[in-house]
Amino acid sequence: MSDLIYSDDQASAHDAVTQMLRQAGVNLDDALLMPPKSSTEQVMAVTGKAGSGKTLLLAELYRALEVAGVEIVSGDFESRKKKDKRTLAILAPTNKAASVLRLRGVPATTIHRILYTPVYDPEYERIAEWLAGNGERPDIEGLTDIALDRAAAFYAGNKSIPGALAAAGLRGSDFITGWKRREEPLDIGFVDESSMLDDKQFEDLKEIFPTLLLFGDPAQLAPVGQSGTMVFEKLPENRVCNLNRIFRQEADNPILDLAHALADPDLTFEAFERMVEDASKRDDRVVWGQRVEVDLMARSPVLVWRNATRIRLINAFRRVHGAPEDALLEGEPLICDGIELPLKHRKKRLDLEARGLIKGAQVIYLGAGRKPGFSRLHVMGAEDPQVSAASIVKIEKPDEEEPFIPFAARMGATFLHGAAVTIHKAQGSQWDTVQVFAPDLYAAARMGRSEAGQPLWKRLAYVAITRAQERLIWVVRNRLSKPSHGLQVDDLKKVPAAALTLDAPEEI
């Protein structure tokens, strides 16, 4: 472990997790790895509100396991020569949530990339084994020494096999021939943002990981269809470690202060808004907004409760940018709403999902693809963000049941506009600056609805506020600013020239 000093509840959680790992044959005290002591399934949860130190504890446990010699599984390539090693995978439900961990030095991947593994062409698998240190430098026709050196240099700085092969000039379709459901179980799984897990995902993970550690925030919103219950709330009490202490930055964090004030059962919506306004006068990290800032909406959606509000804001955003009804502008934000492909195109579905096009993924439209109905897309938070895919884009209109579709392939990835999203869909994501549309939360407060014993508006406000990393804009008026510049994509195009593309077969 590092020289970090834990709080009492962090230390207790660390001790409980260490004991669970010892049962699994991993002794962190003396860095000893042994076979598991039993085949019994072990599940434990570390819970706590924002700022309680869950991510810090996850990161420290990951580093201790790596020092002990546990192999970190990333989901992009696994050597056949390491099947006897102990393994750890660090997972999050979405690319955006995984990218938050990666920015903190934790090699997280999505649940999907662990449930399904790529099948490599045998020739290119030799390169992957060499890069991973398990084979000799290969001699492959058509691949120069310069290309191999470029792959090795990339891999030295970024442990991504697909990224390294792309740096050598290869496309994903060159070296990944398909995807298969994982057959071999792994060892230890850490799952961040586990409040987003539904029961099926939880069961899938238990099949793969005999030792599973969940990190979650009980104050967030439960997945739709889960009856207000999160998977860790169903565990026995002695398998849940709750972190109660809230850590603060050297200068108190006013955003976290507001989030934790919501725990007061006597707090009314009106009193909470006064707290927000007062905080905005003391600290510029909280803004009492008289209008929605349209420039922020392209990369950081406005968070709302009601779908009707979301649709109105999206149409206002497109209108002020002069977007035509029959086309998208480069730089418009989208949200993946799933994949519409028949079973015979299962490989293509897995290709797209593995590259980050899963339900709820944030995407920026970069322009039309080479084939009709195709789009060039930047998947926010993905390790290899540039994708070309058959797309069905739906623009919803106020007071109209059917969405307007500016263009579409016959099948492929489906998208809704992403300039505004519901707070439910924003869960698991974070942005530097977040705009929360307060009139929607006022409407929820007026309705008097509750979820899991707490007023719904408080849960919504808590989730919305804790999406902000640096600045919170609490928008109190139904107004939209004028844009100060057009939509921009130049920064997103600065990726390696050999970025992978996933063009669908001609018939799609």
Image (tube, rainbow, N blue to C red):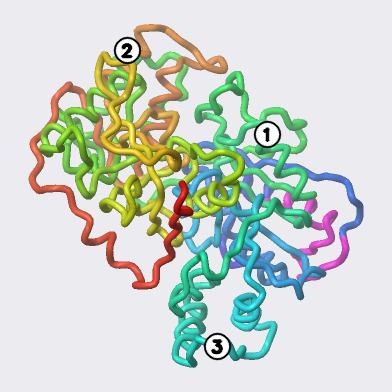
Look at the numbered discs 3 and 2 and tell me whether their residues touch, using CB distance below 8 Å.
Answer: no
Tell me which segment is drawn in magenta. 14-35
Asked if 380 appears above or below 138 in the picture, the reply is: above
Judged from the image, the secondary structure of the residue bearing numbered disc 1 is helix
Which residue is more in the foreground, 395 or 193?
Answer: 395
Answer whether labels 2 and 1 touch (C-beta < 8 Å). Answer: no
Please give left or right for residue 394 compared with residue 347 in the image.
left
Is residue 256 in sight in this rendering?
Answer: no
Q: Residue 169 location in percent, x, y?
A: 43, 77
Q: Residue tagged by mark 2?
A: 443
Q: Amino acid at mark 2?
A: Ala
Whole-Å distance between the Cαs marked 3 and 2? 65 Å
Which residue position holds label 1? Answer: 200
Q: Is residue 394 visible?
A: yes
Q: Along the polypeptide, which appears first: circle 2 or circle 1?
A: 1
* Residue 64 x %, y %: 66, 65
Kind of residue indicated by mark 1: Lys
Sort mark 3 into few (<14), some (14-19) or many (20+) by Cα contacts within 10 Å: few
- Relative to 490, is 354 on the left or the right? right
Q: Mark 3 is on which residue type?
A: Glu
Q: Is residue 457 magenta?
A: no
> What residue appears at the point 47 percent right and 24 percent down from the top-left corner?
263
Kindly indicate the quadrant of the structure image that contains residue 290: top left
The local secondary structure at tag 2 comes to helix
The image position of residue 162, as x and y in percent, is 52, 69
**What residue is at 57 percent from the left and 58 percent from the top?**
59
Residue 141's disc number: 3
Q: Earlier in the sequence, mark 3 or mark 2?
A: 3
Q: Is residue 283 left or right of residue 418?
A: left
In the rendered image, the vertical position of residue 132 relative to residue 343, given as above or below: below
